[in-house]
Amino acid sequence: MLNAVFVPVWKDKPVGAITRADVLAVIDHIQAQGKPSAARHAFSGIRKFFNWCVERGLIEQSPCLTLKSPGRQSARERVLSDDELAEVWRGTEEIGWPFGSIVKLLALTAQRRGEVVRMQWAEIDAKAKLWTIPGSRTKNHRTHAVPLTDTALAIIASLPRFAGSPFVFPARGKPDQAYSGYSKGKRELNAVCTVEDWTLHDLRRTAATGMARAGVPPHVVEKILNHTTGTFGGVAGVYNRFNYQSEMRSALEAWEQHILALENVELAETL
């Protein structure tokens, strides 16, 4: 975060010379680009950095001390229609690896963007058809076992492996780091895809909605999403330790078939 957002702007400034106005200029610029969530994350990161500087005696006071975090945007409700989902899938075929493969896995698994792009080969059990995300990489810090469909496994198996890299999607030229080219990848996909006003997270919401529409019980959808609220909140979450793996697999396989059916229709119309 610091290297990507702040260092290019402040690289010639001593840390003690950075002012509140400097911080606001960067955050306001991000917000002006229509990225309120990115602005909040950037502010959180720089505030932690300056607090660290104060603790180490590098500066007397943080320039973020009197600043408030950018306001939260209202929750998105965007769910892609079947036609839009088919169009996005077609676009992934056109742009290919790595971003196209990432988007396909996002659509098929309903997992978070960061979890998919930081997927490691050691987490994949092809024989058991299972992807185990360690608690260190999940939002709720709980290990999450995700059943993998045949299509998801085929996508993973088709990906190139880079010597010395644990990541399924390593950064270009940096095999020891995970992929991070979201903006460039999304631009490439948008250039060949006619769907408007959609985000990668919308694929997760679309998958959850599609499975619910197909009759998958809410608690199974929540298990797939690795939620700890809803039906797994409070006492229920403490005492209900059943993992619902069979139900999760059936739900994801049904969702896989729905996506493939859409793609077959798209291909038929193209031919």
Image (cartoon, helix red, strand yellow):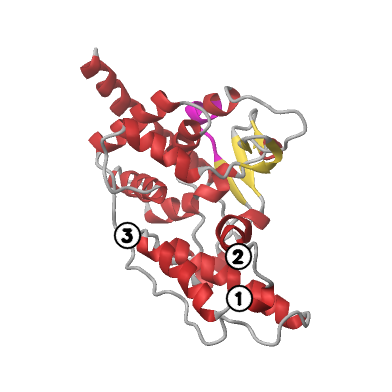
* Residue 167 visible in the picture: yes
Q: Nearer the viewer, residue 59 or 49?
A: 59
Residue 168 on image: x %, y %: 63, 35
* Residue placed under numbered mark 2 in the picture: 10
Residue 18: image tag? 1
Q: Residue at x 31, y 36 (%)?
A: 85
Q: Nearer the viewer, residue 237 or 132?
A: 132
**Is residue 58 within the magenta segment?**
no
Give the alpha-carbon distance from disc 1 to disc 2, as whole Å: 8 Å
Give the alpha-carbon distance from disc 2 to disc 3, as whole Å: 33 Å
The answer to whether residue 27 is above or below residue 133 is below
Circle 3 SS class: loop
From this viewpoint, which residue is outermost toward the left? 269
Residue 7 falls in which quadrant of the image?
bottom right
Residue 107 falls in which quadrant of the image?
top left
Q: What range of the chain is rendered magenta?
A: 147-153
